Amino acid sequence: MIGPTLGAGCTPPSLLITPVSGRRALEETELSRDSLFALDKIALIDVTGTIQNSSSFQLFGAGEHPVSVLLEQLDKARRDPLVKAVILRINSPGGTVVASELMHDEITHFKKSGKPVVAVMMDVAASGGYYIACACDEIVAQPSTVTGSIGVIMLTFDVTGTMSMIGVKSDAITSGLHKDSGSPFRPMRPEERQLFENVVKDMYDRFVKVVDEGRPGLDEAKVRSLADGRIYTANQAVELGLIDRIASLRETI
């Protein structure tokens, strides 16, 4: 029996969930049943869109908080004795480092219940999407899935050329030498670039550690050789050991 769809959203077969306000209880939707007498469940939980540690944007008001939604879904699956396993259906290009890490930690905590968690990658499960997949007991991808993109990026802008053209000049008063590091209103100094590179490297090392721990067949050196930010097809990911196998969602169930 395929039991609850613990999914976020407002179109079938997902549910509208408001875990923060508490105005609406988390519910289940039965997608499929093997027989009338089937009782055991597989919980299908969706992780879609940008992974962020804040409420998603909607045209009319704030949307759902991805981390809070996942926590509530996993907690409900953990407390339901009929749920024997969880499938995490991932369709995400990634997101913020903290949100990815929080989701990874919640999945790791859930696994202490003894219930297996299988990641099923859809169109794309890259960067933060792959990060959280590494917390699962098994990673499965569709034949056309794109995954990988293991790495960290920090973007800054330099608009000094544009400001010069229109005759505008910025003058910042700071409490310390590096308080305005990364300001788009002046060129970045070499020492500031080094500071940012150190931050990115620290986060990158954490990403590598997560992949190393989540993929027993890979050692750290191998992970680093694969973690240059590139994306991989499902076939390439299987061959490299980044995922376990290629299968449809129904085959996985």
Image (cartoon, grey):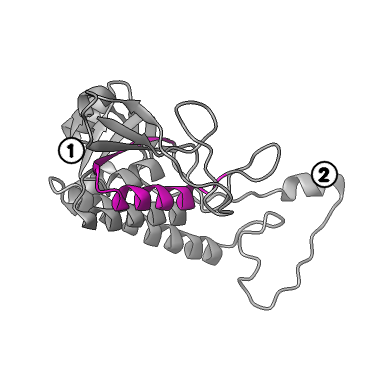
Secondary structure of residue under mark 2: helix
Which residue matches tag 1? 241
Name which residue type carries label 1. Gly
Q: Nearer the viewer, residue 205 or 157?
A: 205
Q: The C terminus appears in which quarter of the rendering?
A: top left
Magenta region: which residues? 64-92
Residue 196 falls inside the magenta stretch:
no
Circle 1 residues within 10 Å: few <14, some 14–19, many ≥20? some
Q: Quadrant of residue 227?
A: top left
Q: Residue 89, relative to residue 143: is it above or below?
A: below
Find disc 2 in the rendering and name its residue.
165
Q: Is residue 127 visible?
A: no
Q: CA distance from mark 2 to mark 1?
A: 52 Å
Question: Which image quarter: residue 149?
Answer: top left
86 part of magenta stretch? yes
Residue 177 seen by the camera: yes
At label 2, which amino acid type do we have?
A: Met
Residue 233 badge: none
State the count of labels.
2
Image coords of residue 203 (percent x, y): 39, 58
The vertical placement of 184 against 38, above or below, is below
In the rendered structure, the answer to whether residue 54 lies left or right of residue 79 reads: right
Q: Which quadrant of the figure has residue 28? A: top left
The foreground one among 248 and 77 is: 77
Using the image, determine if residue 213 lies above or below residue 46: below
Identified at 14% across, 49% down, the residue is 216
